[in-house]
């Protein structure tokens, strides 16, 4: 386990591997805590103790084991499978879980100037602050440039600026309308503007991208 924990400090570790290690660590700690808790309960409430020959007072042991197993299953499911009830936390989780990659040079665009190339490189390297600065310096930004500029701002926690850029993108064309409805609603939520987020989430139809996630976010917003 120590070796796994040390691996978390590796800057090249993937998010998937990091999540797996954290889950293993949490599960191990959870198992240990649960084991100690029920050892005390066995002793104090049931008079069941373990000695070199095994458990004593086996009258209640089978009933206890079945009950403890059920409780452990319920707690375990709650620990690893719950969805955040706070819409702001859920929005951040959705944003963190989605792998957002710029596709690279767009067909039909010959003006692949240095700023655009660097903006794409920085974006895909997850250096969103630098990516945003390169997108900002484009002399003739395309619709795609504006969209990824907004994403870079959002992923760099500049929610107000991201919203402005998404609005600019929205007025120019509907090419990215599904993506804009989703990411702009996330930006509104993270900027503590749930009413505006809700308005956009309601525009996501049942055939659109991230419809189910949008419905869950709406449910969380309405329950607050």
Image: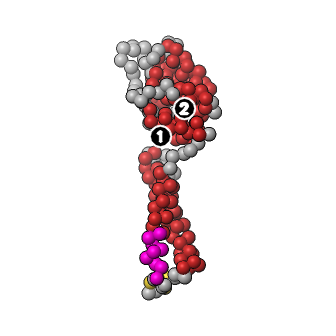
What residue is drawn where x is 45% and y is 17%?
174
Residue under circle 2?
A: 186
Q: Nearer the viewer, residue 154 or 44?
A: 44
Residue under circle 1?
A: 97
Judged left or right of residue 194, residue 141 is: left
The quadrant of the rendering that contains the C terminus is top right
Res. 131 visible in picture: no
| Residue 166 sits inside the magenta stretch | no
For the residues carrying marks 1 and 2, which lies nearer the camera in this image? 2
Range of the magenta residues?
59-67
Q: CA distance from mark 1 to mark 2?
A: 13 Å
What residue is drawn where x is 50% and y is 13%?
172
Which residue is the extreme one toward the right?
192
> How packed is label 2: few (under 14 Cα within 10 Å), some, or many (20 or more)?
many
Mark 1 element type: helix
What residue is drawn where x is 47% and y is 36%?
213
Mark 2 element type: helix
Q: Nearer the viewer, residue 144 or 111?
A: 144
Q: Coloured how? A: secondary structure
Q: In this rendering, is residue 2 above or below 60?
A: above
Which residue is the extreme one toward the left?
107
Magenta segment's dominant SS is: helix
Mark earlier in primary sequence (1, 2):
1
Q: Nearer the viewer, residue 94 or 16?
A: 94
Question: Residue 196 location in percent, x, y?
Answer: 59, 27
Question: Residue 29 location in percent, x, y?
Answer: 52, 63
Which corner quadrant of the image does residue 189 belong to? top right
């Amino acid at each position: 386990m120590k070796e796994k924990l040390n691996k978390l400090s590796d800057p090249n570790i993937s998010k998937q591997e990091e999540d797996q290690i954290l889950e293993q660590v949490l599960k191990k700690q959870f198992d240990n805590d649960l084991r100690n808790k029920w050892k005390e309960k066995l002793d104090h409430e049931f008079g069941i103790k373990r000695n070199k020959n095994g458990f004593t007072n086996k009258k209640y042991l089978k009933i206890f084991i079945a009950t403890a197993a059920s409780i452990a299953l319920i707690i375990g499911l709650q620990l690893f499978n719950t969805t955040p009830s706070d819409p702001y936390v859920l929005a951040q989780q959705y944003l963190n879980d989605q792998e957002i990659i710029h596709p690279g040079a767009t067909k039909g665009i010959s003006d692949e100037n240095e700023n655009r190339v660097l903006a794409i490189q920085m974006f895909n390297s997850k250096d969103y602050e630098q990516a945003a600065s390169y997108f900002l310096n484009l002399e003739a930004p395309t619709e795609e440039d504006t969209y990824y500029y907004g994403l870079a701002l959002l992923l760099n926690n500049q929610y107000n600026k991201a919203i402005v850029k998404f609005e600019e993108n929205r007025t120019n064309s509907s090419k990215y309308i599904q993506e804009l409805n989703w990411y702009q609603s996330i930006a509104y939520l993270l900027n503590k503007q749930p009413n505006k987020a809700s308005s956009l989430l309601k525009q996501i139809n049942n055939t659109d991208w991230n419809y189910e996630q949008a419905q869950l976010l709406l449910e969380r917003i309405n329950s607050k």
